[in-house]
Image: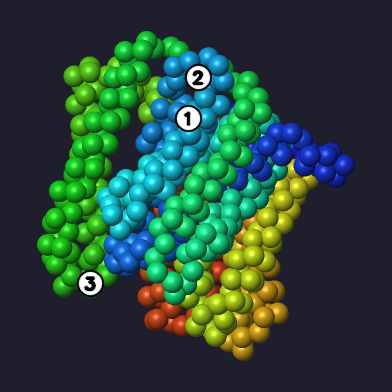
């Protein structure tokens, strides 16, 4: 199985009910509510809220969808996560510590990006608005990297489930503030349906969102720096500047390649189309574009290392060592662990891709959908998250992980029942309650499990890789959910989405037996 540390990492120490309840009110746990709020606030200001602002400003729908690319930083944050792990910030690192200094910088960058967007009318400069959205996505993803690392380092492994539960709860409230809250503010300031476009109303709404980031900034100053040994000062200033240059050059080559290859995607898609069909051909062309662009960035970085422009030892310690450490600790089980990470959320993500369309197709009104699935569903998700955290502390992470995976798959069967029933609010509420409770429970247990897999010497890098991997395959498959529904109908689709989650149960059971002697 590799080294003994792998078993220790996943130790299933449990607590009594009294100790479990008391743990919920620890300062470290409560602080994650506010940091979660700070993390959840920016995401919808790139997606739904920004989309509505742009449509209100008369921007074409096809252009609006391109803005979703501003959030690509969330999927590729593992690329610069090592910088967060290793790079000291002048003055701030000595003053606040490694994690809090990066946390403050990322939060100030988020505030700056929100203000930048608020000060630019998309009707006057769509490019500037796009730049602001990219900056917001990058700085928000950076904040996520730091918060994940801080959460893992600030508490022992047996508290990780509750820490993640509090984080999820705060994250959801932040999303509610940036979604419904931002729209309510824009409406209050004058962006009313049917009225002429009002730039000032949207600008004020985004400025209010920037002010809400004070919640996270105040929390950053209030919490203590985790007591973890750091090697951030091992190299000199010139070494770190060269390392940042490596990242900048590789990123520039990637972006340039992405733009250049973009002019050829139509040609490539036309070559695939006779064999695969239009949709698959377009997907393969874009995938090839991404792969070639990434290869260009990696090649540029490789040349810089070979020419000793950047210290090879520094690159090895930053990018290679975290992977080497993971595989050395878990040995043959490493592949099984990565397989579990990549498939654990497959049922709920594949199903969730068509959820809103399904509600509408079944005849539920927009008011029913908003009230039951958004507001009521939010509270059920938070309740499920805390339930998952409590169960993980009481009975162990692996048992909670198996229960969460089982309930997440089974709850999809309830949607099959909903698909063959007349639209009734009580039935929709019941299904949403079961789905969101199970989803919250599974998420809390899974985040705690991933936290236990990391080595605190490489916290940011390893967790960033895990969090990126866990959505990659599910989101790729989710893109074909609509096609699957057209082919087999909703009831069969939901049953199928439950069945594809069953192998996850075997993976959890297998790893539980081999990695958790106390389970």
- Between disc 3 and disc 2, the foreground one is 2
Marks 1 and 3 sit apart, C-alpha to C-alpha, by 44 Å
Horizontally, residue 214 falls left or right of residue 386, namely left
| Residue annotated with mark 1 | 105
Instruction: Identify the secondary structure beneath mark 3.
Output: helix
The crowding category of the residue bearing disc 2, from other C-alpha atoms within 10 Å (few below 14, some 14 to 19, many at least 20), is some
The crowding category of the residue bearing disc 3, from other C-alpha atoms within 10 Å (few below 14, some 14 to 19, many at least 20), is few
Frontmost residue, 372 versus 184: 184
**Label whose residue precedes the other's in the sequence (3 or 2):** 2
Occupied quadrant, residue 519: top right
Q: How many numbered marks are there?
A: 3
Frontmost residue, 220 versus 472: 220
**Label whose residue precedes the other's in the sequence (1 or 3):** 1
Residue 273 picture location, percent across and down = 18, 70
Horizontally, residue 493 falls left or right of residue 25, namely left
Residue 298 picture location, percent across and down = 25, 35
Horizontally, residue 199 falls left or right of residue 355, namely left
Residues at discs 3 and 2 in contact (Cβ within 8 Å): no
Residues at discs 1 and 2 in contact (Cβ within 8 Å): yes
Residue 119 picture location, percent across and down = 39, 46
Q: Image point 50% across, 53% down: which residue? A: 205
**Residue 284 in view in this figure:** yes
Q: Image point 74% across, 34% down: which residue? A: 27
Occupied quadrant, residue 370: bottom right
Residue 395 picture location, percent across and down = 76, 47
Occupied quadrant, residue 229: top right
Q: Image point 68% across, 55% down: which residue? A: 382
| Residue annotated with mark 2 | 92
**Label whose residue precedes the other's in the sequence (1 or 2):** 2
Q: In this rendering, is residue 344 above or below 38?
A: below
């Amino acid at each position: 199985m590799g080294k003994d540390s792998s078993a220790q990492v996943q130790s299933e120490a449990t607590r009594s009910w009294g100790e479990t309840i008391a743990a919920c009110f620890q300062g470290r746990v409560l602080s994650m509510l506010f940091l979660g709020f700070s993390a959840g606030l920016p995401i919808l200001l790139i997606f739904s809220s920004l989309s509505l602002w742009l449509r209100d400003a008369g921007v074409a729908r096809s252009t609006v969808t391109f803005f979703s690319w501003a959030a690509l930083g969330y999927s590729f944050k593992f690329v610069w996560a090592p910088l967060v792990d290793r790079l000291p910030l002048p003055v701030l690192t000595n003053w606040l510590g490694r994690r809090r200094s990066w946390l403050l910088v990322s939060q100030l960058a988020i505030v700056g990006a929100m203000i930048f967007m608020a000060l630019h009318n998309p009707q006057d400069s769509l490019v500037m608005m796009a730049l602001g959205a990219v900056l917001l996505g990058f700085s928000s993803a950076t904040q996520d990297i730091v918060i994940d690392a801080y959460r893992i380092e600030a508490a022992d492994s047996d508290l990780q489930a509750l820490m993640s539960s509090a984080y999820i709860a705060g994250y959801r409230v932040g999303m509610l503030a940036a979604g419904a809250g931002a729209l309510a503010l824009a409406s209050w300031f004058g962006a009313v349906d049917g009225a002429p476009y009002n730039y000032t109303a949207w600008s004020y709404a985004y400025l209010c969102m920037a002010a809400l980031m004070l919640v996270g900034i105040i929390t950053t100053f209030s919490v203590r720096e985790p007591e973890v040994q750091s090697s951030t000062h091992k190299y000199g200033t010139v070494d770190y500047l060269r390392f940042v240059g490596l990242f900048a050059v590789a990123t520039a080559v990637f972006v340039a390649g992405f733009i250049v290859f973009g002019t050829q995607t139509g040609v490539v898609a036309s070559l695939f189309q006779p064999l695969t069909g239009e949709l698959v051909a377009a997907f393969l062309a874009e995938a090839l574009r991404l792969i070639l662009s990434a290869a260009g960035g990696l090649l540029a970085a490789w040349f810089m290392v070979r020419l000793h422009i950047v210290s090879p030892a520094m690159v090895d310690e930053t990018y290679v060592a975290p992977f080497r450490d993971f595989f050395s600790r878990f040995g043959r089980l490493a592949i099984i662990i990565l397989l579990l990470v990549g498939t654990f959320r497959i049922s709920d993500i594949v199903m969730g891709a068509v959820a809103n369309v399904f509600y509408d197709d079944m005849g539920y009104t927009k008011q029913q959908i908003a009230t039951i699935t958004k507001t009521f569903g939010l509270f059920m998700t938070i309740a499920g998250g805390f339930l998952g955290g409590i169960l993980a502390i009481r009975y162990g992470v692996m048992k909670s992980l198996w229960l969460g995976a089982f309930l997440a798959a089974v709850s999809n069967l309830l949607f099959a029942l909903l698909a063959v029933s007349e639209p009734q609010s009580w039935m929709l509420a019941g299904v949403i309650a079961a789905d969101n409770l199970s989803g919250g429970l599974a998420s809390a247990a899974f985040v705690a499990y991933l936290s236990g897999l990391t080595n605190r010497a490489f916290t940011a890098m390893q967790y960033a890789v895990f969090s990126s991997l866990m959505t990659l395959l599910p989101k790729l498959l989710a893109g074909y959910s609509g096609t699957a529904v057209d082919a087999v109908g909703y009831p069969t689709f939901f049953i199928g989405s439950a069945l594809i989650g069953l192998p996850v149960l075997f993976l959890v059971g297998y790893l539980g037996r081999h990695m958790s002697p106390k389970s």
